[in-house]
Amino acid sequence: MLHFELLATDPHSHARRARLTLNHGVVETPIFMPVGTYGTVKGVMPRSLAEMGAQIILGNTFHLWMRPGLDVVKGFGGLHAFEQWHKPILTDSGGFQVWSLGAMRKITEEGVHFASPVNGDKLFLSPEVSMQIQTALNSDIVMQLDECTPYETAGVPTSEDEARKSMQMSLRWARRSQEEFARLANPNALFGIVQGGMYEHLREESLGALAAMDFPGYAIGGVSVGEPKEEMLRIMAHTPHRLPAHKPRYLMGVGTPEDLVQGVASGVDMFDCVMPTRNARNGTLFTRYGDLKIRNARHREDHQPLDPSCTCHTCAGSAGVSWNDGGRGGFSRAYLHHLDRCGEMLGPMLASIHNLHYYLNLMQEVRDALQAGSFAALRAQFQADRARGV
């Protein structure tokens, strides 16, 4: 089940505020979706995710297929009970992970033959197999199997002809995914994925064909695959608002806070990215006033929180009161620097909580601004704050 309700639009951009109702709950958009590759958002308890405002998270079809395996997850009735997350879940198709295997896989019209990176077993992933796996996972949003068109191969950019052939095969796989999804009587929602590389006219051909198939929602794939930032921004500015206005639009694998705000302005409703948690584990923290490298020696004796305006548990403690509001709770930059230097696991856990809270709170502020008709002002203030520096 999927119901999409458009609530507000911005007169100065393609930004919009909407509500997405799925089998396991309601999602207010624009939304950022934390990535839970193996059935967990690394280092963050499900309860913490809910407390910081996460409405929907991701699961990774490929990795969950490898471990723990479908029999285990099916025994729990799907991912929700298995990982104790009872709000909506989106699963990817597994195509990107298989594509990432490089020489370990062979792509044909029928699907992808590859060797398991876990134990070397010979495996096969097709549109039909992907739908069967995702049906067993019982995710609220299922993604079609597509071929991720690379930006370049061995340093040579993908040609227009190569991008066209890849895109057209993804369209054929979309139809097969749709047919198998229907055969399985999956009660959830299947999204089609727009491909076409860095070629706008191929993107338009792809989205036109997918729109004719009448998917409940649409995603934009094939970005953040090694292309220069300006190329990604060009496709992001071109494609989202051309998708059906009465369906949700999802930009896959993007990105920085600036990318999210720009994506919203371009008409995107849903985002996901590993950046908040991956950067947290590597000591990079996102704040309202720019990015902070907690490993820098200048933080060794710093009593400030990561972000004085932040109300996450890391910055404000259990009371949730920021320094800007007179609060003195939370953990200091000096303490987080110490944890990082010592390799203590609490360090990346607290950093992940902060980064995810920052992303989710940013999307809440965007939703509020769209509802109030002040998105342009919020966007200008966001850019000024981020440029100010920590």
Image (cartoon, rainbow, N blue to C red):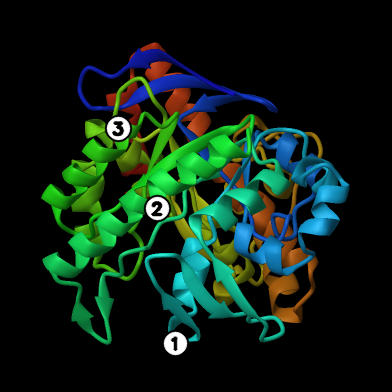
For mark 2, give the secondary structure: helix
Residues at marks 3 and 1 touching, judged by CB atoms closer than 8 Å: no
Where in the figure is residue 189, as x and y percent of width and height?
55, 32
Check disc 1 and give the amino acid type: Ala
Residue that badge 3 annotates: 211
Looking at the picture, does residue 61 appear above or below residue 240?
A: below
**Mark 2 vs mark 3: which is more N-terminal?**
2
User: Which of the pair 271/248 is nearer the observer?
Assistant: 248
* Total marks in image: 3
**CA–CA distance in space, label 2 to label 3:** 15 Å
- Going by the image, does 277 lie left or right of 318? left
Amino acid on which the number 2 mark rests in the picture: Trp
Apparent side of residue 298 relative to residue 172 in the rendered image (left or right): right
Vertically, is 294 above or below 52?
below
| Residue 82 in picture, x, y percent from top left | 83, 48
Q: Residues within 10 Å of mark 2 (few under 14, many from 20)?
A: many
Q: Residues within 10 Å of mark 1 (few under 14, many from 20)?
A: few
Image point (23%, 85%), residue name: 155
* Image location of residue 63, percent across then percent down: 66, 65
Q: Which residue is mark 1?
A: 103
Q: Residues within 10 Å of mark 3 (few under 14, many from 20)?
A: some
Q: Secondary structure at mark 1?
A: helix
**Residue 317 visible, this orientation:** no
Relative to residue 293, is residue 255 depicted above or below?
above
Quadrant hosting residue 389: bottom left
What residue sits right under mark 2 in the picture?
Answer: 173
The earlier-in-sequence mark between 2 and 1 is 1
**Residue name at image x 77 percent, y 44 percent:** 78
Three-letter code for the amino acid on which mark 3 is drawn: Ala
Q: What secondary structure is marked by label 3?
A: helix
Closest to the camera, between mark 2 and mark 1, is 2
